[in-house]
Image: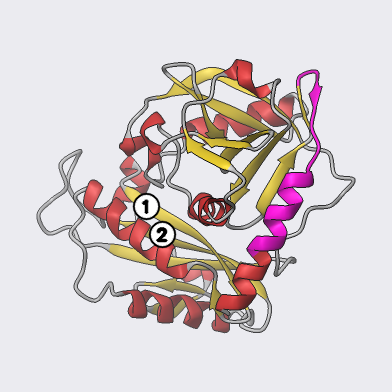
Amino acid sequence: MVNFNGSLVSNTESKLTLENRGYKYGDALFETLKVVNGKIFFWEDHYFRLMASMRILRMDIPMNFTMEFLEAEILKTVEANNLIDSSARVRLNIDRGEGGKYLPSEDAEINFNIVTEFHDNPFYTIAADTTYIVDLYKDYFMAPGLLSGVKSNNKAIQVIGSIYAKENDFDNCLILNTNKSVIEALNGNLFLVKGDKIKTPPLEDGCLKGVMRKQVLEILSKDVNLFVEEASISPFELQKADELFVTNVIKGIVPITRYRKKSYGNEFAQKVVTKLNAKLRLTS
């Protein structure tokens, strides 16, 4: 079952029209959520990121788009798909409706739809023997700036980058901005560990304002023995790092095991995962 503007319908009944602006122009936003046993992980952070993104794209936010309303609609959809007592991956999509060319018509109304699927791991784990090989994706570059960090439906670089990774037997690729700084992975934020120094690219470089990125930064900020900074990362720093890892809400923390000729461990990432799961238990 799919939730379309509050109505639960079957997949076959939920088709968007050819005039939908999300389809025609990518005039849409989305949030990917992890829901476990009826609890949306980090829902408040997702919600405020969504509202901020709608304002950046100058979308008129409907009066009923409260945090409580959207949460209830998400859980209603999860329950309708018999996933309320398990783990689910949920996509909440917001589009600007229909009408207009590049300039939306004045009567275009905001739509939302929610789709769910089963997810097999309720908590975050790192398998000790898993390999995760990455390389740089250099065919196209992201423009630095906050607009690049909006989670919109315009994901051409991520799509063709993922195809490139598959064709070259990589598990993921790292994206560069037009200043040739490494800003993120195709599907998550990047963290670099070198001794007691932890770096992640700043939002101004064009990386996604990731919800899991925020959680990890909050966890790291509580350790007085670490020096944590949001600073640009050059490709040359990657091979000098002790660890590299990717973060997103669905998988949590994914350690990179190899970049070109350099191999990495995951000892630090394992410690962060332990603290992350402890944080979730405390807030559940």
Task: Find the magenta span and give its range.
Answer: 260-276
Residue 246: within the magenta? no
Horizontal side of residue 99 vs 48, given as left or right = left
Q: Quadrant of the C terminus?
A: bottom right
State the residue lying farthest toward the left: 106
Please say if the residues under marks 1 and 2 sit with CB atoms less than 8 Å apart. Answer: yes
The Cα atoms of the two marked residues, 1 and 2, are separated by 6 Å
The foreground one among 265 and 86 is 265
The image's colouring method is secondary structure
Asked if residue 265 is positioned above or below residue 14 in the image, the reply reads above
Mark 1: few, some, or many residues within 10 Å (few <14, many ≥20)?
Answer: many
Residue 75 visible in this rendered orientation of the protein: yes
Residue 19 visible in this rendered orientation of the protein: no
User: Residue 214, percent across and down?
Assistant: 48, 53
Asked if residue 117 is positioned above or below residue 106 in the image, the reply reads below
Mark 2: few, some, or many residues within 10 Å (few <14, many ≥20)?
Answer: many
Question: Residue at label 2?
Answer: 93
Name the kind of residue labelled 2 in the image: Asn
Name the kind of residue labelled 1 in the image: Leu
Q: Quadrant of the N terminus?
A: bottom right
User: Residue 109, percent across and down?
Assistant: 20, 62
User: Residue 85, percent across and down?
Assistant: 66, 84
Residue 265: within the magenta? yes
The foreground one among 71 and 100 is 71
Question: Residue at label 1?
Answer: 29
Residue visible at 36% across and 56% down? 49
